[in-house]
Amino acid sequence: MEKPFDLAVVGAGICGLAHALAAARRGKRVLVLDRELAATGASIRNFGFITVTGQEPGASWERARRTRDIWEWVMPRAGIKPLQHGLLVLARRPEALEVLEAFAAGKMGEDCKLLGRDELSAYEELRTEALQGALHSPHEVRVESREAVPLIARFLETEFGVVFHRGVHVWEAAPPRIATSAGIFEAETVIVCPGDDFYALYAKTLANQNLTRCKLQMLRLAPGPQHLPPLMSDLGLVRYRGYLGLPGGDALLARLQAEQPGHLARGVHLIAVRSEDGSQVVGDSHVYHPAPNPFAEDFIDDLILAEYRALVRAEPRVIERWTGTYASGPETMVRLAPDPAVRIVIISSGTGASTSFAIAEDTCAEFWG
């Protein structure tokens, strides 16, 4: 048995790593346990897009702003390249433009700028003739998740002495005793970050949280447009909680239901971001089920690509496809205290990259101030 730790984190996804970082920055001795040998789940099956604009008003928006700032601190220290900054939310319909105008006029629209069709003509790779306008946000940053997550783990090991044990199943987390397939560890406190695994540790506690799983499909396109910022289409305005309830929203939803019912039925909206090699990551979709099947549907990929073609002057060529799952629930996050020395933290809104670091700071503050 190793020397006792101040904190054991169960789960080495972005949420678990964020908690390890928050504790390590407080000078705590941290252990991270994960059943996988490397990151393979939701933390790398995403856009790598730290999104502020459009987050739910209030705590979620504030967490996204704080998380973005911590990413900016971590990236140069961990050797993570920021690939893009900002976001262009494109309005194909007048109703979408009305929503964006209302958003820009509010508190969360600070530093965002509305662009007319003439201003959008500077982006020659966009189908500006199909657009009513757009909102430009300067707040976002894009990283390559499949590279960034391992680099954060390495940074925690080398700079803070965080101890990782991978390929380890945790049977019981009851501080100071943590029972695992690799033996017994000791830690004064435990933070469990189970992602969308609701049936292992503290299953009875999680059974009361009304959680389910969301399955998504995503694509990587061969190198194409090289001069576009990250893009979102107006389908996102009826999904992101920061736009809900704004003027034009009900009319936009009604029009989308009439014009793109297939997209809405599969929770499809468009985000397109660029990678260092010029390829683009595009997606995604949202299908909710407690046990989603692992199979990707061509029909959903076609819906995503149709939305892309409607906005971008390029014929997309798919070079990679994948599915993923993450926890989903009525709230943006769940933080439970089944024991004074234990916290369970689940990000239940698909915003792990965008909110984890701030959530972790708040969790650790409950233990150590």
Image: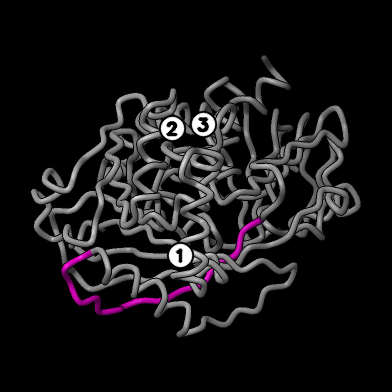
Task: State the separation of the CA atoms marked 1 and 2.
Answer: 35 Å
- Check disc 2: other Cα within 10 Å, few if <14, some if 14-19, many if 20+: few
Q: Which residue is mark 1?
A: 284
Q: Label 1's element? A: loop
Quadrant of the image for the C terminus? top right
Residue 174 sits in which quadrant?
top right
Residue 154 sits in which quadrant?
top left
Q: Label 2's element? A: helix
Q: Which residues are magenta?
A: 312-327
Apparent side of residue 357 relative to residue 269 in the rendered image (left or right): right
Position in image of residue 349 (x %, y %) = 60, 49
**Residue 307 higher or lower than 160, as above or below:** below
Q: Amino acid at mark 2?
A: Glu
Q: Amino acid at mark 3?
A: Trp
- Which numbered disc covers residue 159? 2
Which residue is depicted at the point 50% across and 38% down? Answer: 246
Taking depth in this image into account, of 115 and 170 the one nearest to the observer is 115
Apparent side of residue 121 relative to residue 365 in the rendered image (left or right): left
**Residue 289 higher or lower than 50, as above or below:** below
Q: Which residue is mark 3?
A: 61
